[in-house]
Amino acid sequence: MKKYHIWTIGCQMNVADSTHVGAELEKLGYEPTGTIDEADVVVLNTCVVRQSAENKALGKLGSLKPWRLQNPDRTLALMGCMVGVRPSPKLLNAFPWVDVFMAPSEARPLVEHIRNRMTAEELRQAEARQLVFRHQLQDEAYPIASLKHLSLAGETPVAAYVPVVYGCSHACTYCIIPFRRGIERSRPLQEIADETRGLVAQGVREITLLGQIVDRYGYDFEGGRPNLVDLLEAVHEIEGLWRIRFLTSHPSYMNDALLEAVARLPKLMPHIEVPIQAGDDEVLARMKRGYTAEDYRRLVARIREIIPDVAIHTDIIVGFPGETDAQFQQTYDILEDLRLEKAHLARYSPRPGTVSARRMEDDVPDAEKRRRHQLLEAQHERISAELNRRWLNETVEVLVEDMHKGKWRGRTPQNRLVFFEDDRNLRGRLVDVTITWTGPWSMQGVAADRLAVARDIPTGLIVH
Ligand code: SAH
């Protein structure tokens, strides 16, 4: 059987795009391999949100040149934000050893490349395989073409990503994503629901709905419906699905109806990802974020008021053009005040084509960006450790995802990582775990009771 290997870097959307490509290749009769040398097809799924990510992809691309040139039957595909919606002639010329260039979320060019090289018999065999797969799903009604993230090989994780809004039409001045992922497009609700049912039939228990501004789901539909609340209600109905998250939110698009839905629907986890980016109003205005620090404070208070025990995650950029020490201090201070559960920290990196790269001087020296980054890192570690301590001796519900270094690894409703030892196979189970140790980035515990393996699971759905 022919094999494929996918290398992925970047955001959750890229991870989802990679599972989509994997699923499409499996429909053509390919199987996954972790080893590049075994692979007939290698896909590099790239990110350019910061220069550092772009450099890693360029390095990987260079290292794959000999692999590709050694054997003319091999296929190398370059995918994602390095390619963009339409690859530039410059990119095409720079890497002549790449066979296929693929826009983000777009598997078709590779599928067509491979199909064109398959014999009629090979195509027939691939079709037959799909029929068997559909039969295994026990629901012939699924339109298989719309199931974008299902692995025929059954290598399905416990927690999976489901894109619901592709692209982005916002114009944050630092951000390259709208240039590379195209305009905002919502996926049809029915397609998302079908796909989620398919994932659940394969053993997925938690889904995270993805969009650059996920709260804008449906804004591009006539009349703005269905919206994110409608979508959450629809997937909430799916039997066998236990947990639902969504990200990333934008402070200007979160509303009470959405927060109330999270509070009301039991499968919706108390976990909100809503980036602030900076704590200074002038910096926020130059970033074109569309809100003030005070607006953000009010939003955090509102989220906490409506969703009990919520964990709020945020993103921060330090060293945006013109950011003074005093302005950085505003970011530090608001984080000190708000004590958010998680902060993804980044140093500003000018990206080609963006407003900030064209019109603003990247004038915060690298050493200063690093210093600010380190200050926030230390602050975050301290606050995180303090917040986690509150879980000590508490019993929390953990959805077990996998085994890591001899311990089961899973997440709490608040998305806190928990490790614990147990000799039973608990993958894909909800387990009550009593926390015995907490650190800033994870917690450890013991399964509360041998009989407390929570909730009965219909057999046959679990991947042992
Ligand atoms: N649309 C999502 C994700 C954007 S990319 C959102 O609104 O959050 C993820 C994070 O990368 C951003 O939140 C931002 O903090 C960071 N980022 C984006 N562009 C950047 C740049 N040019 N330099 C440094 N960090 C950047």
Image (tube, helix red, strand yellow):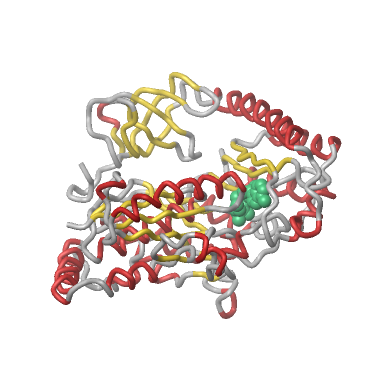
Is 206 positioned to the left or the right of 217 in the image? left
Image quadrant where one finds the C terminus:
top left
Location of residue 140 (image quadrant): bottom left
Percent of width and height locating residue 441 = 52, 29
Percent of width and height locating residue 163: 46, 60
Compared with residue 132, is residue 407 higher up or lower down, i.e. above or below? above
Residue 236's place in the image compared with 294, above or below, is: below
- Picture residue at 36% right of the left edge, 67% below the top: 110
The quarter of the image holding the N terminus is bottom left
For the point 21% across and 63% down, the residue is 29
Q: Nearer the viewer, residue 156 or 102?
A: 102
> Residue 133, image x and y in percent?
19, 63
Question: Quick check: 141 left or right of 408?
Answer: left
Q: Is residue 366 visible?
A: yes
Residue 121 coordinates in the image, percent (x, y): 13, 74
Q: Is residue 249 visible?
A: no
Residue in view at x 57 percent, y 53 percent: 48
Residue in front for this viewpoint, 303 or 379: 379
Nearest the eye: 204 or 302: 204
Please tell me whether residue 355 is drawn above or below residue 268 in the rendered image. Answer: below
How many discs mark residues in the rendered view? Answer: 0
Residue found at the very far bottom of the displayed protein: 222
Residue plotted at (45% across, 51% down): 61
Front-lying residue, 304 or 85: 85
